[in-house]
Amino acid sequence: MLLKGITANIRVPDGNGGRDTLEEFQTSAKGRAARSTYVCSIDDTAFELFLRRDKEISDDLVVELTIDGVEVDGVWHWEEGTGLDFPLDCVPCGRDEERLLRFAKIARIKNEDEPDDEDETELGCIEVAVHRVKILGTKRRAWFGAATDPCNVSDHAATDRKNRGGIPPSHKIALGERRKTKRLPDLEQVYEYRDAKALAIFTYYYASRDVLEASGIVPSAPAPSGSRSEPTAADDATRSIAAANADVKVEVHDDPELTSPDSAASVNVKLEAHDDTPDDGRRRSKRLRTSANRP
C-alpha cells in the first residue's frame, strides 16, 4: 500500500535467504490518511512489516503498532537521515533481547446462535500508524522492552470478544523465542506529535488462504498448469480401440459454403476395431465417429 509518500507491505522468508512480499487483496481507502487490505498469512511463520518513505519526506517519524486491537508497548523511532527503509520484524523484551513477530493460526469458527451452514470467518488485524514528530531531546530510558507476550488480549477484551462473537479470545500474534540483540541505549528520545492525527495508517486483515478463499475475499487458486482431469468413458473407449490395432480411415469433405482456401474443412474420422471373439461367431466392427476441424 502507498499513502502520503509511505509504502507499506508485509514480507515473509522465501526459503532462500530473501523475503517475499505478501499479495494484497481488496485494498480500500479509509479516509484520506488510511488504507486497508487483506493478506494471506502463513501459520506459525515469522513476518516483517516493511516501510519505505519517499526521499522528499524530511520529518522525524515514529511508528506505532496495534495487533488485534491491542497496542504493542513502545514506539519505533524513524528519524530523518537514518535511511528510507524501515523494517520491523521483532519487539524488544529486555535490554538486549528481542522476539520475532510470527503469525498465529486463525480458524473458521461458528457462533452458537448461527445455523451450521453460516460459519463466521474471524480475521486478525495489524495496524501500523506513522506519525510526524518533533524531537525535543532525550531522557534516561525507563522502558526496556515489551512484556513476555505483549499481544495477548486483556481479560476485559477477552470477555468482550466472547460476548459479541468477535475475534476468538485466544487469538494473538505469536512471538518467537528470545534472541540476543544489540543492547538498548541508556537514553531515549522525547518527542511531541506535529499533527493531531497520524500521517498514514495501514491496516492489514489477515488469515490463512483457505479461510480467505472460503470467505470470498481471495479468489481460489487456479489448478496447476499441466494437470489432467480424471479419464472419461470416451477416453477409455478411445484407448480400447487403439489397443485393438484400429484401422483408421480419414474422410475429408470440403464444405461447399466455405469459399476461402484458408477456411476450415470438416474432417470425419472413422476408427474401426475388430473384435476377434464375437458371441455369434461373426466378425464385427466397433466404430467411433468424431468430427473435427483442420486448418
Image (spheres, rainbow, N blue to C red):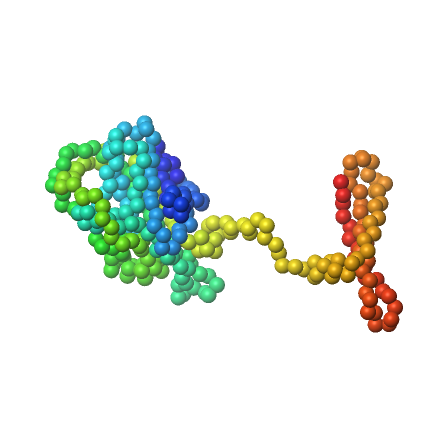
Q: Give the residue at the far left of this rendering.
A: 140
Q: Is residue 150 above or below residue 109?
A: above
The residue at the point 16 percent across, 41 percent down is 185
Would you identify the image quadrant in which residue 20 lies?
A: top left
Q: Give the residue at the far right of this rendering.
A: 282
- Which is nearer the eye, 158 or 20? 20
Picture coordinates of residue 123, whole percent (x, y): 38, 53
The residue at the point 32 percent across, 27 percent down is 56
Q: Give the residue at the far top of this rendering.
A: 56
- Which is nearer the eye, 279 or 220? 279
For the N terminus, give its image quadrant.
Answer: top left
| Marker count (numbered) | 0
- Which is nearer the eye, 90 or 30? 90
Query: Is 234 left or right of 252, judged from the image as shown?
Result: left
User: In this orientation, does residue 57 appear?
Assistant: yes
Would you identify the image quadrant in which residue 21 lies?
A: top left
For the C terminus, give its image quadrant.
Answer: top right
Picture coordinates of residue 156, whole percent (x, y): 25, 59
Picture coordinates of residue 254, whole percent (x, y): 84, 42
Picture coordinates of residue 91, whole percent (x, y): 25, 48
Would you identify the image quadrant in which residue 182 lies?
A: top left
